[in-house]
Image (cartoon, rainbow, N blue to C red):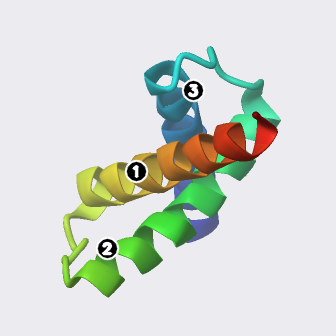
Amino acid sequence: MSFIYFIVIGAIAGWLAGKIMQGGGFGLLMNMVLGIIGGVVGGWLFSFLGFSTDGGILGSLVTAVVGAVLILYVGRLIKK
């Protein structure tokens, strides 16, 4: 069940990050990849800053979206 949970949260987080960063999304597969990697980056960032992300689905979603937005932001900086 946790694998499906990661995929669903990843897909939603990637889609939200694309909307926040005005990218419009990257398709279902890339949104999932971006959201899952964003969850790892967001989890690392939040733990580094001393925040707890034990908020269940909402906490996981916020963490993944923040991480995915950060990845998109850095990607756009490098692309320019």
Q: Are marks 1 and 2 in contact (CB under 8 Å)?
A: yes
Q: Which mark is residue 66?
A: 1
State the image quarter where residue 44 is shown: bottom left
Q: Secondary structure at mark 1?
A: helix
Residue 60's spot in the image, x, y percent? 36, 59
Location of residue 44 with respect to 79 vertically, above or below: below
Q: Amino acid at mark 2?
A: Phe
**Image location of residue 62, percent across then percent down:** 32, 50
- Residue bearing the label numbered 2: 46
Circle 1 packing at 10 Å, graded few (<14), some (14-19), many (20+), is many
Density class for disc 2 (Cα within 10 Å; few <14, some 14-19, many ≥20) is some
The residue located at (79%, 38%) in the rendering is 79
Measuring from the top left, give residue 34's x and y in whole percent: 67, 48
Q: As drawn, is 24 to the left or to the right of 58?
A: right
Task: Say if residue 61 shows up in the picture.
Answer: yes
Q: Position of residue 48 (x, y in %)?
A: 34, 85
Residue 8: in sight, yes or no? no
